[in-house]
Image (spheres, rainbow, N blue to C red):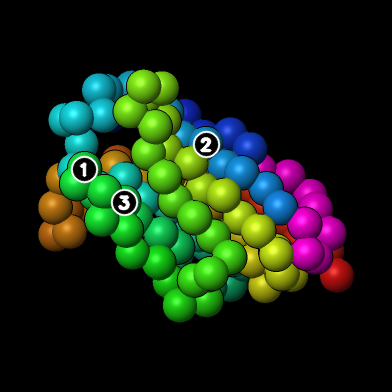
Amino acid sequence: QVQLMESGGGLVQAGESLTLSCKPSRNFFTINLLGWYRQAPGKERELVAVVSSHGNKNYADSVKGRFTISRDNTKNTVYLQMNSLKPEDTAIYYCNARNTWSQSGNWGQGTQVTVSS
């Protein structure tokens, strides 16, 4: 079991940037997959980006070229840098930690990101 502490959400205008942070309660090196998911009102939760312990990264097509996920091993923190934000990026963003894709893993409490047009 791992607890995830998220921060960095807020209200921005379209075109602006935000950085989300997620700090697991357990050492990074015991977690294989760290990712960000989001859920907009009336929609299902979807994958935004994930980074493995080997540094492999996957992104949703809708955020490629705009969002960057990274792991800082010295700070035991995973970041989601979001640039060129669009109103359709508005959602609650959740951090997730798991060791395999077949696991549901552990979830953070979520942080709200709102992008106004």
**x and y percentages locating residue 89 in the rendered image:** 64, 66
**Nearer mark to the viewer, of 1 and 2:** 1
Residue at (14, 52) in percent of width and height: 100
Can you give x and y, in whole percent of width and height, for residue 62 in the image?
52, 76
Gap between marks 2 and 3, in whole Å?
A: 14 Å
Q: Residue 73: which quarter of the image?
A: top left
x and y percent of residue 53 in the render?
A: 21, 43
The stretch in magenta equals: 9-16
Residue type, label 2: Ser
Identify which residue is drawn at 19% across, 46% down: 54
Q: Is residue 35 visible?
A: yes
Q: CA distance from mark 1 to mark 2?
A: 17 Å
Secondary structure, mark 1, is: loop
Mark 3, secondary structure of its residue: strand
* Left or right: 57, with 103 as reference point: right
- What amino acid is labelled 1 in the image? Ser
User: What residue is shown with label 2?
Assistant: 21
**First reached walking from the N terminus: tag 1 or tag 2:** 2
- Label 2: few (<14), some (14–19) or many (≥20) C-alpha neighbours in 10 Å: many
Asked whether, in this view, residue 88 is left or right of residue 77, the answer is right
| Neighbour tally class for label 3: few under 14, some 14-19, many 20 plus, Cα within 10 Å | many
| Residue 13 within the magenta-colored segment of the rendering | yes
**Residue type (three-letter) at the residue carrying disc 3:** Val
Residue 14 painted magenta: yes
Disc 2, SS: strand
**Which residue does the numbered mark 1 point to in the structure image?**
53
Identify the disc placed on residue 51. 3
Classify the position of the N terminus by image quarter.
Answer: top left
Q: Residue at x 19, y 30 (%)?
A: 29
